[in-house]
Image: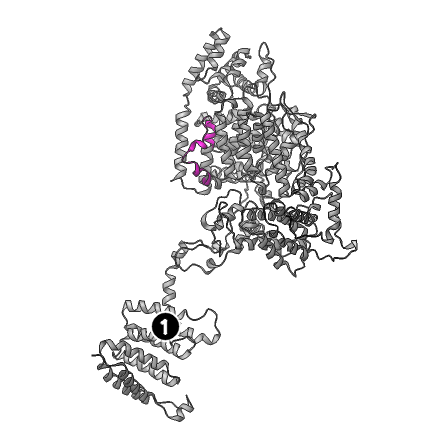
Amino acid sequence: MAIPMVPMETQLQSIFEEVVKTEVIEEAFPGMFMDTPEDERTKLISCLGAFRQFWSSLSQESHEQCVQWIVRFIHSQHSPKRISFLYDCLAMAVETGLLPPRMVCESLINSDTLEWERTQLWALTFKLVRKIIGGVDYKGVRDLLKVILEKILTIPNTVSSAVVQQLLAARELLGNLVSDFVDTFRPTARINSICGRCSLLPVVNNSGAMCNSWKLDPTTLRFPLKGLLPYDKDLFEPQTALLRYVLEQPYSRDMVCNMLGLNKQHKQRCPVLEDQLVDLVVYAMERSETEEKFDDGGTSQLLWQHLSSQLIFFVLFQFASFPHMVLSLHQKLAGRGLIKGRDHLMWVLLQFISGSIQKNALADFLPVMKLFDLLYPEKEVSISDTCIPVPDINKPQSTHAFAMTCIWIHLNRKAHSDNSKLQIPIPHSLKLHHEFLQQSLRNKSLQMNDYKIALLCNAYSTNSECFTLPMGVLVETIYGNGNMRTHLPGTNCVASGSITPLPMNLLDSLTVHAKMSLIHSIATRVIKLAHAKSSVALAPALVETYSRLLVYMEIESLGIKGFISQLLPTVFKSHAWGILHTLLEMFSYRMHHIQPHYRVQLLSHLHSLAAVPQTNQNQLHLCVESTALRLITALGSSEVQPQFTRFLSDPKTVLSAESEELNRALILTLARATHVTVWSVAGELEHLIHRLVFFKQNNVPQESRFNLKKNVEEEYRKWKSMTSESEIITHFSAQGSSPLFLCLLWKMLLDTDHINQIGYRVLERIGARALVAHVRTFADFLVYEFSTSAGGQQLNKCIEILNDMVWKYNIVTLDRLILCLAMRSHEGNEAQVCYFIIQLLLLKPNDFRNRVSDFVKENSPEHWLQNDWHTKHMSYHKKYPEKLYFEGLAEQVNPPVQIQPQYLPIYFGNVCLRFLPVFDIVIHRFLELLPVSKSLETLLDHLGGLYKFHDRPVTYLYNTLHYYEGHLRERTNLKRKLVHAIIGSLKDNRPLGWCLSDTYLKCAMNPREENPWVPDDTYYCKLIGRLVDNILQKFALRML
């Protein structure tokens, strides 16, 4: 039967108070009177004796209440001596088996009066628990540990040094128990994280491909960590430096969206992104304070241009709030005195304001006026000296100086159109700028010799009445006068007469809104001419200007996106083949940094286009195939997997139904991407390659050498025996007939040195699409013919005939024949013969070598800086005319055939540029065969200069050295030659040492067979130092 609580408390109180009672003098002088150890022990034994008798009389149910009362009694004491004695009593009670240790521990730790501020109680409690916890069972210890940790967590993270005793007491209790336990999970944490993750930075490019390693929480900017594991502390920190670094890089916006999980389809404001954009603007303002010049293409100018593009994108998709950013900028710039970069800041803000003010409320843009008050401190007085002077409008940066005035004009226009009562008078400091713009607007004969037109476009792009005049001047400049004409390469091909494009400096000086108006005007005109099927081609100035506008990422919706998804399909539906050819040329030779999903989308369009009957025309079919090849080979290794896995359900979108060569090029690209990026072939890649191989095996049969020879001889006998011209043409050009006609032409030239007129008629009837199969068969036949040649005069005869078929008779273009030869599946001696034929075609006659030499010498790859490309283009084509309709054969047959083929407009292309992607493949194929190493070195010596015009020469070189490392390991001369040819081709367009170190250029590039250069530790240290210096260059610039 349980004892009532009141009697229990009374008895306990009498027991313990009797033991701890002290004299008055002891209370007055605590610590001055000490009991001897014998007296202390006597008291303990006496107390425990009385308590044992009481404890034995209690029921089991009352034990816990009793212990809890004792704890409360101890904690109610104020005398340190009493508290210490009572804790000793508890310890002895447990040690003698009187009290259960678990019950005592739980009562002490769970006590509400155990607080970390009470130093002695805290320390004695943990000391006692440490002493008696050994008597608690496993589950009890586990439960106690949880409560102890919770109690310890009540200590704040930041405390004074006076709390050290409490912390030491907790540490003494737990010892290394918790830390050792936690340490056992650190390997698991490392497995689930990346070593040095916070110190790593991604390589940012325009592919949009990225792994989950860079994902961040969009609220905290922390890495998303899985599980409650003991990760390194820095992994829990906000990764602002990482986001800032990525934002600073060009082509980074897709990566930023992937990092933060931002979806263009879902409008979601991201405050942390806003903060970083604002900080970048402040940094740009700081940089502008230290730079003397801005319009020299320096880092500050590039930074402001980049910031403009980033801000437009993230604000346009509502990931950042424009008014919030402006107010934050005002707050962070206040009191800093940073005004040298104010014009550039206003230029950045003008980009967004001019394009969005018509669709948004005026109040969203008024915070800009607060920035104006801060950054333009000129006094509001009546004298004109305080007005900001009109800058030199012959310089492109004058458009930045006018940016604030343009902003005011747009705000004022918005206020009037909304009938707003809020009027914004022109600030006195901007009056001279405003008067200059109004005066210029009254001038109806604007000239293109300064930036006045750009200023007017920027200021009045939201005012259609005023905008028409300056934009009309720009448009008419590139459209050309209606009566003026200029010739294009080929016969019967003329274009509108304007040949000078708008310079990049002028386009850079236009706001995004003005650029969008210009590109919309151009696209509308192209569509109009496509519908009208005009016989006059687009003006070269228009085509070049359109190409330049398409590279601006901030006008993507009307730019490249509209180009791929709207303009191309519309032109195709209108059967405007000349314009279609023009658009494909633009994509091939002018648009170098297009996002991969647009390129893959265009590749799919091209495969569909190739099957349409109307494209079965020599020039257009060649252009379609060449563009597709360029798209495939230009795919970066990191771009392949994310793009092509989307097409696994329908591989036909990336496969060609007509061209074995394109499908083989795709397989080679997939193989290279797999090797370079270590992309596993166990899954989707293996599936795609199987589909490709299946397609090849079932659609492109390859005859044996014996059967091929036999069939050619049989068809040649038929050719000689048939007498009816119509029957001959029908037989050899019929659909489904053996693709052997080029082999027959070869034999005609070998036997008779001429081809009759019927041969030309058959070629004309076969058509461009079917002729590709004939070229493929001819490539195999050539290998057989050269393999069985007796050498000497016969070999020379074969070489002469082959070159005549390319350059004299224009039966097949060099790039297409070389591509077919390079992609054939020959082994052993036959492969060597095939590559020997390629070498002969490229080097034996001077035709191609001269073309390459003159093109490399007379042209620059930096076409965006040229205003006379068309003049040089026409000069080259007049010297080396391209003949794509068998004109040479038509002239040589007996009797000659008079033809005037209608050429499609050629603005950029020629055989040298078409050959570049083929040359990429030729080099790779030659590397696979050891005996032809010397031949490849010879090719690089004579043709390596073409890499001056390669879109990605260093990337191609890296991929080649990476993928063929096993083939090149022991072929040092060839490796050296490859590096020298590709990097050396750019020596006139890049500064010295731009790619390779001075040490490498001096030592490695000079062959020394007897004493080869072996890099030492010093070289590698300097190389790593150079890499670090380049990576950290931006941080060094911040210290200037």
Residue 18 quadrant: bottom left
The answer to whether residue 189 is magenta is no
Q: Is residue 488 above or below residue 44?
A: above
Where, quadrant-wise, is the C terminus in this rendering? bottom right
Q: Main secondary structure of the magenta part?
A: helix
Q: Is residue 784 above or below residue 268?
A: above
Say few, some or many: other residues with alpha carbon within 10 Å of mark 1 (under 14 / 14 to 19 / 20 or more).
many
Q: Is residue 60 above or below residue 233?
A: below
Image x and y of residue 981, in percent = 58, 36
Image x and y of residue 153, in percent = 41, 69
| Residue sitting at x 46%, y 17% | 740
The answer to whether residue 646 is magenta is yes
Residue 83 visible in the current orientation: yes
What kind of colouring is applied to the model shown? one colour
Image x and y of residue 715, in percent = 45, 13
Q: Residue furthest top?
A: 723
**What amino acid is at disc 1?**
Leu
Q: Residue furthest left?
A: 1
User: What element does badge 1 sit on?
Assistant: helix
Residue 554 quadrant: top right
Residue 918 visible in the current orientation: no
Q: Is residue 294 or residue 399 the one in the foreground?
A: 399
Taking the image as shown, residue 143 lies to the left or right of residue 982, namely left
Say which residue label 1 marks: 173
Q: Is residue 910 or residue 310 the one in the foreground?
A: 310
Taking the image as shown, residue 342 lies to the left or right of residue 952, namely right
Image x and y of residue 733, in percent = 48, 15
Q: Which residues are magenta?
A: 641-665
